[in-house]
Amino acid sequence: MANHRDNLLQLSYIRTVTFFGQCLAVIFAIYGLNADLNVWLIGATLTVLAFLNLITYARLFSPWPVTEPEFFTQLIADMSLYGALLFQMGGATNPFIFLLLVPLIIASTTMSRAYVWLISVTVVVIYSSLLVYYEPLVQLSNNHQHRIMELFDIHIIGMWINFMLTVLVVTYFIVRMRQSMQLQQQRLELEREKRIQDQQLLSLATMAAGTAHELGTPLSTMQVLLKELEHEYQQNPELLEDLNLLRQQTEICSDRLKQMAQSVQQEQATSQSIPASQLLEEVLEQFKVQRPDVTFSSSLLSPGEAPVLNCTTSLRQSLLNLLNNAADAEPKGIEVELEWDQNNVYLRIHDNGAGISLEQSDNLGKPFVTTKGKGLGIGLFLTTTTLARYDGDVRLYNHPTGGTLTEVTLPLRKTA
């Protein structure tokens, strides 16, 4: 489907160029050729053209879409006004007669076949009429016969100028129209990718809901058995420590299943505005509980007060997924850095693992693709999708000193 709003905007630009060009042509005809023109009628026609252009430009600010019949009407109006101008300025003898081709070329590249044929018939009718009915630019008399060759030369020069202007205008419009079509194609491709991604998310959500329902019973059984074991082996401190750790892990799993069961409204209700440094601190605290075997260091690279981010449970889980990925690559010596500027917040996670191969980098972020040899391969996919909801993204690089550098970019909230 053609973007007629953008096409109409380009048409208004062409009208502006045409308006000033015709004004210069009228001035040259009057003072250069001493042509006897009806200035009032020509001025009225040019005024109508300028008024139509202003109305069109104002209409482009309205929310209503520009339909193909409306764009067709605009082109017919252009041809009619061009025909009225040419009728008063020599008709088909005017070198600017090719101005009638501009609406036809525009229609042939932007409209359906039926409208193109209607435009073609209209152009032929107007051009044929101007061969017979027109007001001559110069009334030749016996005293003016010697100027025939001079006027012919002027006509040839005018034809050349008109040809060059037509080429420039048409080329400019077609280039802009092609860019508009390319942008529209890119939008369609992005929408297609988003639709595929939404379908994948829906499939994952369906599987997650079934899994959450099935895992609830065995987790409850494990928690009951762990409590009994703790009560039975109170005299064994080492075993009690391991049982306590295992019970914490099962409670974390149980809590995560409960969070998965929450509705979208409940998820949005957990949204809160907190400083980025506080968000990182809370995520790292949760990370320490889940992965007590991991050693890491964190640092703030930007001075001053940290900017505020709109934080939800899904965002926290996304950052936690990235930390877990780094810990799976190498649990020792993870470096976490937080930095910000006027537009974005940057979170960088550097692990000392094996890094990323070229084959893996092409598929990172796709569902069911993993680089760890274990797991389901959906953590990075869910993280990428969640960050996209916040207009952010995540990128993975091979660090110069070894390992993988994971960089998260989150835009700051715009304040009024």
Image (spheres, rainbow, N blue to C red):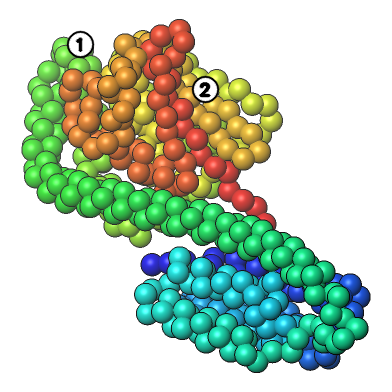
- For disc 1, the neighbor class at 10 Å (few under 14, some 14 to 19, many from 20) is few
Q: Is residue 276 above or below residue 87?
A: above
Q: Quadrant of residue 62?
A: bottom right
Horizontal side, residue 217 vs residue 108: left or right: left
Give coordinates of residue 232: x percent, y percent. Answer: 9, 22
Residue type, label 1: Glu
Give the structural element (helix, strand or loop) at label 2. Answer: strand
Give coordinates of residue 157: x percent, y percent. Answer: 74, 63
Which comes sooner in the sequence, label 2 or label 1? 1
Quadrant of the drawing holding the N terminus: bottom left
Spatial CA distance of label 2 from label 1 is 36 Å
* Residue designated by label 2: 337
* Residue designated by label 1: 238
Residue type, label 2: Glu
Res 37 label: none
- For disc 2, the neighbor class at 10 Å (few under 14, some 14 to 19, many from 20) is some
Give the structural element (helix, strand or loop) at label 1. Answer: helix
Give coordinates of residue 54: x percent, y percent. Answer: 70, 78
